[in-house]
Image (tube, rainbow, N blue to C red):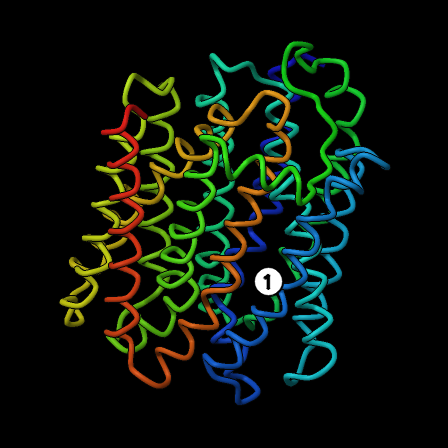
Amino acid sequence: MSRAAILALFFLAVFLQSGTYGLTFLLPDLFAQFGGDEKDVGAMLSITALATLATVYWSGHMSDALGRMTMLGLSGFTITLALFLYSITTGTGGTLTMASILIGFGWGLMYTLAPVVLARLSGSANRVRLFSLYAVFMMAGFGLSPVYASWLEAAGFDIRDAFRMVAIFCAVSGSLFLMLKRPIARYAITEAPNARSRLSIVAISKIMRSRGWLPVVMVCLGASVFAGLNNFQTSIARAQGLDYADYFLAYTLATVAFRLAFAGFSGGKSPYRIIAALQYVMAASALLFLVIGGNQIIYIACAILFAIGYGASYPILVAMAANDADDDLVPQTLQLFSLAYFIGIFGFPYIAGWLIVERGIPTLLIVVAILAAIEATMALLRHRNGG
């Protein structure tokens, strides 16, 4: 099996499993079937956040013992069970709590260890390119699963059927990761970092004293913006009388297009200046949501601008996390990067759900715009200070 074939199958496995996160955007609709609201969604995602954070912290210990590809395979099978439990839940009880824990465990393993494996298959010269392609497949899974669910509902199926189908996709993904265990070990670049993966308090302290601290903090802010806009997009669309599938389709296509455009970008001399410019666009897109007024054209424009701002900047930022890390701390830096990401992705919805119920959607949009502006300014300051 050639290196290109290995990468293609690896990216396919990432794509199939990434649909999991896209389904979390539909939790408000799923919860509405048994009387739940945005606060309940936020509470369950908080449980997922705790499970994910614990998994990310211990993922290095588990992968050192069992192997990274073995743990990636386990992630697919764990998420399969989690999505099946979501599909049969009838209330905010034990079944839903267990599903939330399992999805945090599985997704934490996949999102943390897949970039570490990819770093072993790439050198610093082509890392931005491969991480951009990785981000393309991940985003395609994120964005297309809500569209797929919408189409199933339009065809007369229930939203629960979408959870069952993606569960099958995740089982296939887990099988692919296990199949690739030996080929990836054979093709790993020997000069790429292959330090032990265990994350510890000492390692975190070293990372936060290095240049790698900035991408870690920035990704937490960006993930919060992403979660605030996407996890409750069904609620935002419903309030405007619009179809959330239009947003996710436009966002996904635009993100894939811009990430492919940046796939040939090797970082350049001023990567943080580019990140800053893109993330100011992200802040503007959040503010534009305030003036949609039920207009579908503006709604789609919001999706495209957010795709440009967040979608194009994220793969550059994750590559900077790897490049800014000390050579002996690349695996741990990527794990800490994932840890910060999940704090935003699964932790911020608790705040966002409270804001929607207690203060309204406009307040949420203003808050996420401020967070986006702060992240962009941090990148700009790093650029001005020689980043």
- Callout 1: SS: helix
In percent of width and height, residue 352 lies at 40, 71
Specify the quadrant of the image occupied by residue 67. Answer: top right
Q: Which residue sits at x=62%, y=19%?
A: 121
Question: Total label count?
Answer: 1
Identify the residue at the far right of this view.
Answer: 65
In percent of width and height, residue 288 lies at 17, 60
Q: Which residue sits at x=66%, y=21%?
A: 6
- Kind of residue at disc 1: Ala
Q: Which residue is mark 1?
A: 49
Left or right of 192 on screen, residue 229:
left
Tell me the quadrant of the picture where the N terminus can be found: top right
Q: Which residue sits at x=34%, y=26%?
A: 262
Identify the residue at the far bottom of this view.
Answer: 35
230 w.r.t. 88: above or below: above
Specify the quadrant of the image occupied by residue 112. Answer: top right
